[in-house]
Image: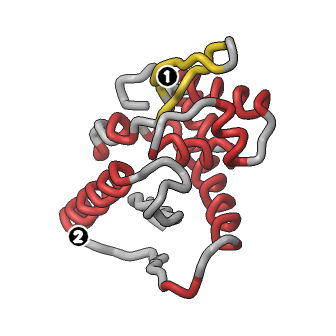
Amino acid sequence: MSLGDPPGRRQAALRAMAHPVRLQMLSLLTGASLTAADIARELGLTHANASYHLRNLLAGGLIVQDGEERIRGGIAKRYRYDSARDRVRERDAFDPSYGESQQALFAAVANELVRRTAEADWSVGDTMTDAELWVDPEVFRVIRDRIAQAIQELHDAARIPRSPGTIRTSTTIAMFRMGQP
């Protein structure tokens, strides 16, 4: 999804992301291209349900088809999430006209964070911040861009679920300018 997308496509993408199962799917599809059957097994869904959610993500332009493979006489499509593509947009030119959809997305992400914390391994440490701060606009831009770079590095390092030598992690970051109180 980018600013060049038509408004209807942007809205469809934000609506698609505002579903907790689809957020989980995007996470899985960051590390590898997977089929609906792969996702169904990993998330404990029916194949039909996984296919339905994949179609919504594809229609919203959030995932891309990444090949096909023959399985038991049929053809299974593989999908992946291209996180680099979503980082292309100019952050300062973000279109505020779909703020309502962004609010729905952030609410879905908050619910997803609640689900993930229930599965956390608190024995190895964590890092977290939640703050409403007043900072110089240039300082905010520089820090936001550094965090965006770290996010991209983390997405690039993602591997297939349960790959040997990997650990399951949760990363949730939301940075945005606040309106005047």
Picture residue at 64% right of the left edge, 55% below the top: 107
User: How busy is the neighbourhood of tag 1: few (under 14 within 10 Å), some, or many (20 plus)?
Assistant: some
Name the quadrant of the N terminus: top left
Residue 64, percent from left and from top: 47, 25
Picture residue at 48% right of the left edge, 85% below the top: 125
For mark 2, what is the residue? 136
At label 1, which amino acid type do we have?
A: Gln
At label 2, which amino acid type do we have?
A: Asp
| Nearer to the camera, 164 or 45 | 164
For mark 1, what is the residue? 65
Labels 2, 1: front one: 1
Given the current orientation, which residue lies at the most extreme front position? 72
- Mark number, residue 147: none
Relative height, residue 43 to residue 77 (above, below): below
- In the rendered structure, the answer to whether residue 138 lies left or right of residue 122 reads left
Q: Secondary structure at mark 1?
A: strand
Q: Would residue 173 be visible to someone looking at this image?
A: no
Picture residue at 64% right of the left edge, 24% below the top: 55
Residue 158, percent from left and from top: 41, 52
| Nearer to the camera, 162 or 86 | 162
Residue 114, percent from left and from top: 68, 67
